Amino acid sequence: MMRLLISFLLGIIVAPLYAQFPYTQKFTYPAQLPTQVIYDMLADQQGYIWLATDKGLFRFNGRTFVKIPFDNTSMQSVSYLQQDPQGRIWCMNFYKELFSLQNDTLRNYRFKDKRIKEESIIVNYVATKDHIWFASLENLYQINKQTGVTIKKVYSPEYLGISSLVKNGEEVVAYGAKGWIFTYPSNKTEWKKTSFQYNDTRLMSSGKFVYGTQIGKSRLPAFTVNNGKLKLTKPFDLPEDILVFHFASTAESEQWICTQTGAYLWDVSSGKTKLIFPNQSITDVVKDYQGNYWVSTLDNGLFVCPSLNNKLYTINPGFGFDNISRVTTISNDTIVTGTTKGMLTAFNLKNEKRMHYELPIATEIQFITYDSIDKKIFTNRGIFNLTSSFPDKVADYGKSVVRDHRKNLIVASYNRTYVLNNPLGNNPDATPDTTGIPLYSHYMKNDIFRKGLRIPVFRNARSSKILLSETGKYFWIAYYDDLYRYCFSDSTIVIRKKNNQKLVARTLFETSNNLLLAGTSNEGLFVIKEDKVIKRYHTGNGLKSNNIKSIKERDGKIWVNTDETLQIIDLKSGVITNLLDEYGLAGLTVNDFSLHPNKLLLATTSGLVVNEYRGKAVNEIIYFPLIKAINNGVEITPNQVLSSNKNNISFYFDAIQYKTPTNLNYRYKLLGIDTSWKVLSYSNNTLNFYQLPPGAYQFQIQAYDKNGIYNSSIKTFAFSILNPFWQRWWFICLIVLVGSGIIYLFFKIWSKRLIMRQGLKERLFKSQLVAIRSQMNPHFIYNVLNTVQGLLYDNRKTEVGNLLGNFSDLMRKTLQASDRQMHSLKEEVENITLYLELEKARFDKNFEYIIELELKEDPADLIIPSMLLQPFAENAVKHGLMHKAGKKVLLIRFTQINNGLNVLIEDNGIGRKLSFQINQRNKSKPTSFATKAIAERIELFNRLHSQKIKYDTIDQYDDLKNPSGTAILLFIPIYDQEMNSM
């Protein structure tokens, strides 16, 4: 199970023999922080930890080291970390190149003053709100931070030997080796001479004061700077052989001296120091917003101390075995510890004295039980006392022991549970004294361990824990397959879970109100009252693990140690607290623990950790410095309005958690599409939303600790996505206006066309009347009647009857067609035939007509304009054939093609030219309506319908170029059947 992040390895600072120091972890992230050399550190205003190393600048958020790239640099190594009032990070390399962090890149700061570039040694710089102050050994420069232009060079009356430059808020203080002091702002921006002349002096800001003292091995008095005045304090009391590197401040009252042998807390007023982080070449100490102390070294990487309240004791320093498996409190001053190598030690918490019992290295110490009456220590390796390092008795007592009221020893071992005679009595190998204990008589067995030995054996089964009740009337034994309660008064009860399921316990504890707590290896913690399970705690209701190692009670609350962490259960409220997280010990492997009256004792894989029941989190708010939104690689600003096609949004966020980094979670929702919170693990810092619909959105996200101790404020990011332009109000209004205009124009044009069409129809009707008049003109009727008269004179009555019949049929059909614009081709051919029959009667035997039909369909199904062809036939007869001598022939041929009819009307008459000449000479001849009617009707039809009628007139000549007739070529579209009713 992942206990710490990525390749987080736990290491402990090695301490001098018999010393105690704060519990400290070493961080090694070889994939992220590829160096052990750290020159400087900074805890910034947003909560990040910055590391200046020989490999560049790194940012840390508790989970990940991020290397910051350069835009341009001569070397990777950086130091001199600072943050200006605007929150920007600054650093400098050893080639005098200054950098500022902009858009996650270190930008090389450009000085305009060539004198700065020519300085051989740079002491330091400070970045204030408006200025950069730059100090060399001889000169101090004030520079405009925005432009890089030198505002002034602060001259001095003599060589300064500037050794330090520091800022304290907006105050800038510099010190020269010959006693010169400079402060800004002040009444006069100049160096002032003092009586303090220190070489290798370093200034340090605590946020309230500026302190000055020497690095190296000098031990002259320190001083404070206040309003440009120096005041001496006592020198710090470090041995002169310790080389001082640096000074640091983590609070107004916490000043640190960083040396080649460790970091010391320094009380400036008294000069006293205390070694806190030993045996390392310390370059800096900073404290993050949650109270963790970060310690950087020159050659051994990075360390973190969660709290100065957690003391680490090395119990067995000379043996190299400090994996403590068991710890038991004997008295206020004395405890006993056992290790995984079988070593047993009595340890005095007050004077830190140790008494190691004389035992060979062997198996792990499984239990430590103290008999306060006989003042004896019982373990699985034997019996011991507090006055001698030699065991009183060496024996294997299995997994657990208790003593009954007869001082017999009840032993829970690997293969049976049994009773031995008082091991401290005169005859420990005898049969146990069972006087007044009826229970034992039911379990007596012979020849156990040796022939003749008779002892009680409760079960030949493996057991892990035995617990004597506070009343002394009964005891419990946790077997590998069941939990038993034995009453000395002669009764045995098997305690089961609900539905009579077996309860397999690993450890047992009785509370002050006589509840039995049974810890299991895979089912959590069972609370038992009067032999019945009344409650179970497990991972589903708050425990971090179901594997319970040990249980204790303090102030009415239950302390439970699992293979994951140490937790406190309030049985009344049901609230479960993760103690190691609260005490700044997250990730610590605790094998066992003991509740000392004044201290919490933790047996760990690295020694004994002691906490004086202090450790409430310094800051329960999780810092959440970063949330930004990106669309197509471009960062968007809060409340920005995006176009409809910019609806793929990515959110980047970063919360900072140092106490329990792997317990960090996020919960988020995007108001506008989400109504409930969704959970995201610490390893994800990106969310993508694709194809968001138009609307107003607010992204909400909160960082929180899974243990319920820490959380951040809810961070929000609002933005909007516009509707597509065709869904916006202005476009809708425009569409309504344009649509209304189009409708208005449509109706206007439609009404105009309707009127025009109606006019065309009226004209078409008039043209149809013209056609009727052409069909029934007086000249035609006169000719027909004249023909009838001639036939009557010749007594050709049959022909007269036929002629009159044809004439009447023609008149009837003409009148029937007068109310229709369309009729079938069949009807048209019938009308033409009747007309031509009448004309044929006039010409007697000299006139012949031929009508040919080359059709694909029935002529009754082909719809054409009514009375359209008769005028062409009339023209052919009257103007082409009438004046021709000899045989007169008229051919009418209908040929159906895909989209209409091709009509050929051909005569062998005199031609149009000669006919025109004759008509000019005969002015008195009645005017024919045919030609005008043809042109007008065709024009009207073509205007009313999309299908156009086309015709052409062709003059024909014989071989001698003499007129030999006229041919009319027509194309008539085939109209729909519905138009037949027109």
Image: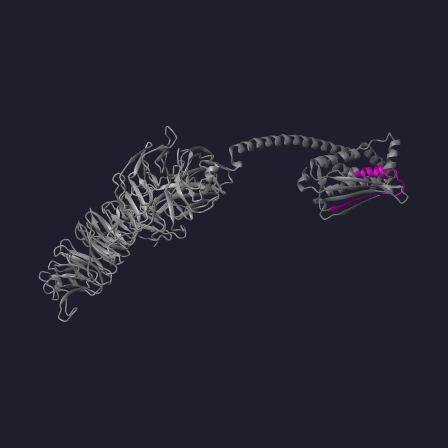
Residue 47 in picture, x, y percent from top left:
36, 41
Residue 634: x percent and y percent?
49, 41
- List x then y, in percent, for residue 101: 44, 41
- Colouring scheme, one of rainbow, by chain, secondary structure, one colour: one colour
| 457 w.r.t. 981: above or below | below
User: Which quadrant holds the N terminus?
Assistant: bottom left
109 left or right, relative to 762: left
The vertical placement of 150 against 679, above or below, is: above
Q: Is residue 721 visible?
A: no
The residue range painted magenta reads 872-896
Q: Is residue 573 left or right of residue 807?
A: left
Q: Residue furthest top?
A: 187
Q: Is residue 199 something that shows in the picture?
A: yes
Magenta span includes 420: no
Nearer to us in this view, 358 or 534: 358
Counting from the top left corner in percent of width and height, residue 588 is at 29, 51
User: If the image is split into quadrants, where does the C terminus sit?
Assistant: top right
- In-image side of 697 versus 926 (left or right): left
Front in this rendered view, residue 103 or 853: 103
Q: In the figure, residue 805 lies in which quadrant?
A: top right
Q: Quadrant of residue 672?
A: top left
Q: How many marks?
A: 0
Instruction: Name the residue furthest front.
Output: 158
* Outermost right residue: 960
Instruction: Give the residue at the far bottom of this rendering.
Output: 451
Residue 884 within the magenta-colored segment of the rendering: yes
In this view, the residue in front, 476 or 413, is 413
